[in-house]
Image (cartoon, coloured by chain):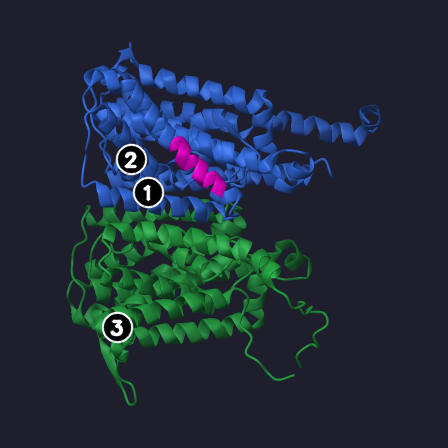
Amino acid sequence: MTWRPRLAEGTAPVLVVLLLLLVGLAIAGPAYDEPSGYLALLKRAAPLMILAIGQYFVIVSGGFDLSVGALVTAGVVIAARLIDGSESATTGVILLVLGFGLLVGLVNGLVTTKLLVPSFIVTLGMLLVLDGAVFLWTDGAPRGALSAGFRTFGRGALDVPVLGEVPWSVLILLAILVAAALFMRSGTGRALVAVGDNEAAVRLSGGQVDRLRLLAFVLSGLLAAVAAILLGGFAGVSAQVGSGLEFRAITAVVLGGVLLGGGRGSVVAAAAGALSLEALFTLLNLLGVSGALESAVQGVIIIGAVAYASLGGGLRQRLRWWPKQRDSVRPAPS
Amino acid sequence: MSTVHENIAPARRTAARPAVRRRLTPVVIVYLALAALLVVGSVLVGMRGEVLLDQAGILNILTRATALGVVAIGQTMVILTGSLDLSVAYLIGLTSLIAAETMAGREGMIVPGLLLALAVAAGVGLVNGLVITVLRANAFIATLGVALILRGYLEHTYTGPAGDVPRGFQHLGYDRIGPVPVAALLMLAVVALSWWYLSRTRPGYHMYAVGGDVEVARLSGVPTRRVIVTAHVLCSVAAGLTGVYLASRLGSGAPYVGTDAGYDLESIAAVVLGGTLLAGGRGGVVGTLGGVLILATLDTIFDDLEVDPFFKDVVRGIVLVTAVALYARRMMADRARGRLA
């Protein structure tokens, strides 16, 4: 048999949707005749895609992370207050923000695994704590300013020989995406999916369920901190910078065909889901749909996507006229 | 069976223990915590030379508890069934607007306004339930999607408060008997009614069955789809009642009255704080009432102590996680000692 590229389960629909949206963009907007338009789209989408990758790790292992939006806000507000315009503090504060994300993820993970509290509740509690603590610390309104060096990652660009100017955020996104895809192909990554699919089986076969779950939350927290650094640079300091991002990231992951409850889906598809969401918003904007209706469209789309994912298999089976190849018959790849 | 067990000494010894521990159910813990909170709060407020549980204090706690209480009772039913409703906050805003706009200041339109608001709420619940059962979408996504659709409609149609509630209807929000608001009594009636429904009727039992294990319930002949749809309709109607109540207090409808107070996540927090399992099948409205009262009392104490409002969120988050960790620990302990051992 000839080799054919095999996509992970559930990846194809989101890629088709993404392609349609990109074609739609090319027709609707003159800015999308050139690569630079798409590069700008990718730059805008980078923070959400990074959040979606982090959320993917948690969702595929059977959890939720509702704290990422609050974590993004916290990261930006903390950075602005500590840097306060001084260039010399930039590096230290970036490391601090990353460390903070790591710590929040660690707490989420430890409470979930050791105290056996459902992750929905843990991260909801973390959301409340972070929102409250950040504004308690800043007396209600974010203060200070980010330095130019800090903002480079969100808005600056790097000269790449062939491509020309490539935004930093796109480079960071690509690095994270490649690393995430490689990670999911490794033993640890596969075990993470297995935990979401059947925790008991992983435990009985000697897998470190708690450690894997903890890892997922830590990665999600760390990536939320990265998203905070990009968003702080791109959008500036505000108390609303991260609000609602947790639901948007979950939407993106689900749009990418990842099963809520875990055990199924690919990380590239989750990132593609985030890009699709951002492309959709751009398209709606170009078509002159009011910003208010954006969320309604988003609502219809996620219901449709999930309904398709759970009913679609059945529909496809009914429409399929050729016999399905059984996995057991297919020779194992060597 | 029981005679066999009674003849075995070790079994008897282990059987006696859970009986003692079983009295400390989450519901009991919640009300003990509430009592402790009231005592500690009274002392703290008393040190400032004020009284926590004076007329104004009781009124404050009960008023806060009324709005959250009704949504949380609806949320309890949905969570017991193993589902979840993230759309209640926007629905509260929507129903407050529908009621206030239909009434438009006319006394004669009170009943039609009320009925229309509740009918729309029931319709939204029906959509939630059908999306989950027929389209087989995960409850989290289904209700999040419906919430986003409602949000889009609200943002598109309204820019601020609208409608006008007649004087006669404002009595619902402000009348009281002594320190007890009439609305709080109505809320308690809703609690009593749902307690009866959940623990004394067949459809109520079915909710527990579906929440415990959908497959087992289905194989035992429980109409699982109908149960889930019913739970969602009841939950949305409860949210509608809250919207109507808030309209009567505000004197008009407001699109963000539900989301500003965060009733979606707050109601889930109250339910879980009240000892209901997030995964469904265990818990009840009595515990939820306790959870709601704890949250309302915390708020009132913080107001009396003039604590920074942002500090409230921090404490709320910690209380929530601690409570659920406690319940989880107890459940694991029970299971380890359990009947299978």
Q: Is residue A8 left or right of residue B258?
A: right
Q: Is residue A28 left or right of residue B37?
A: left
**Three-letter code, disc 1:** Leu
Identity, as a three-letter code, of the amino acid under mark 3: Ala
Do dots 3 and 2 share one subunit? no
Which residue corresponds to mark 3?
A40
* Residue depicted at x 43% and y 20%: B190
| Chain corresponding to green in the figure | A
Question: Which numbered disc, 2 or 1, marks the residue closer to the eye?
Answer: 1
| Residue nearest the observer in this picture, B221 or B70 | B221
Q: Are marks 2 and 1 on the same chain?
A: yes
Q: Label 2: how many residues lie within 10 Å, few (<14), some (14-19) or many (20+)?
A: many
The image shows residue B203 at horizontal and vertical percentages of: 57, 26
Q: Amino acid at mark 2?
A: Gly
Chain B rendering hue: blue
Q: Secondary structure at mark 1?
A: helix
Mark 3 or 1, which is nearer the eye?
Answer: 1
**Label placed on residue B150:** 1
Give the position of the C terminus of chain A as an image quadrant.
bottom right
